[in-house]
């Protein structure tokens, strides 16, 4: 195999100990260009392999996220329920208002809706404290029954909201009816239970919100 001097590039024979052109020892000799190309190609292939591996990892993560979302069936609404129940325990009407659907203010009136939530909390918490003989320490919940509103029925509801209440419903994409939300209320020594019926969860502008259908709009 032909080889070349690493110092001056002159061709050398396999048996040469030094370069006949410049006298450089054979240890600095570079083998032919084909071998050099193979080394260079090997480095490129390694970089390509790393890039492909990273790309595969990204694709796998994306697929897992999609599958989780499909299996979860929009389980992001549970985060809104968690906030709602925590706000009940803390007598925090402002948080309940903040996670309520925008149609609540349109239908009930913003100020009246605030008062409605305050009355709701007063009635609930006063009753809980009477039953457990202490302040409410913790409230947990269990969804006993729920149903996802079909696309056809959702469009009917949206039309009704638009026609009867002049509500902008363009941002509404999903709706779930919680037929019964069972609550467990814990005090210092006693516990009690309660339930909230016909609570609606509405996905609006990409976020899950709550809606109290006191007027029976969706019945």
Image (cartoon, helix red, strand yellow):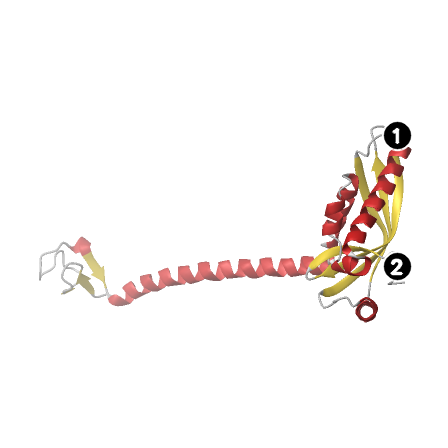
Residue at 12% x, 59% y: name it: 19
Outermost residue toward the front in this view: 111
Q: Quadrant of the N terminus?
A: bottom left
* SS assignment at label 1: loop
Residue 101, horizontal then vertical, whole percent: 75, 57
Residue 180's label in the rendered image is: none
Vertical position of residue 98 compared to residue 166: above or below: above
Instruction: Say left or right for 52 vs 23.
Output: right
The residue under label 1 is 133
Badge 2 crowding class, 10 Å Cα cut-off, few under 14, some 14 to 19, many 20 or more, is few
Q: Nearer the viewer, residue 62 or 165?
A: 165
Vertical position of residue 184 compared to residue 4: above or below: above
Quarter location, residue 35:
bottom left
Residue 215's label in the rendered image is: 2
Residue at 18% x, 59% y: name it: 6
Instruction: Say left or right for 192 vs 27.
Output: right
Badge 1 crowding class, 10 Å Cα cut-off, few under 14, some 14 to 19, many 20 or more, is some
Residue 177, horizontal then vertical, whole percent: 83, 58
* SS assignment at label 2: loop
Residue 135 appears in the picture as rendered: yes
Rounded to the nearest angstrom, the CA distance separating label 1 from label 2 is 33 Å
Residue 75, horizontal then vertical, whole percent: 73, 55
Q: Nearer the viewer, residue 42 or 216?
A: 216
Q: Nearer the viewer, residue 44 or 191?
A: 191
Residue 70, horizontal then vertical, whole percent: 71, 61
Residue 83 appears in the picture as rendered: no
């Amino acid at each position: 195999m032909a080889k070349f001097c690493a110092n001056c590039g002159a061709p050398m024979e396999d048996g040469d100990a030094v370069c006949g052109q410049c006298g450089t020892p054979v240890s600095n000799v570079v083998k032919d260009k084909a071998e050099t190309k193979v080394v260079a190609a090997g480095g490129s292939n390694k970089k390509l392999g790393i890039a492909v591996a990273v790309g595969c990892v990204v694709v796998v993560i994306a697929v897992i996220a999609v599958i989780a979302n499909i299996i979860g069936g929009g389980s992001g609404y549970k985060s809104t329920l968690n906030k709602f129940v925590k706000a009940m325990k803390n007598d925090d009407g402002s948080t309940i208002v903040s996670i309520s659907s925008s149609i609540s203010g349109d239908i009930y009136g913003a100020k009246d809706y605030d008062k409605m939530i305050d009355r709701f909390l007063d009635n609930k918490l006063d009753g809980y404290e009477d039953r457990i003989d202490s302040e409410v320490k913790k409230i947990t919940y269990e969804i006993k029954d729920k149903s996802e509103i079909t696309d056809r029925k959702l469009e009917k509801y949206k039309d009704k909201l638009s026609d009867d209440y002049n509500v902008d419903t363009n941002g509404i994409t999903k709706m779930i009816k919680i037929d019964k939300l069972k609550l467990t209320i814990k005090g210092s020594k006693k516990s009690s239970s309660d339930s909230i019926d016909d609570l609606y969860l509405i996905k609006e502008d990409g976020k899950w919100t709550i809606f109290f259908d006191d007027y029976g709009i969706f019945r």
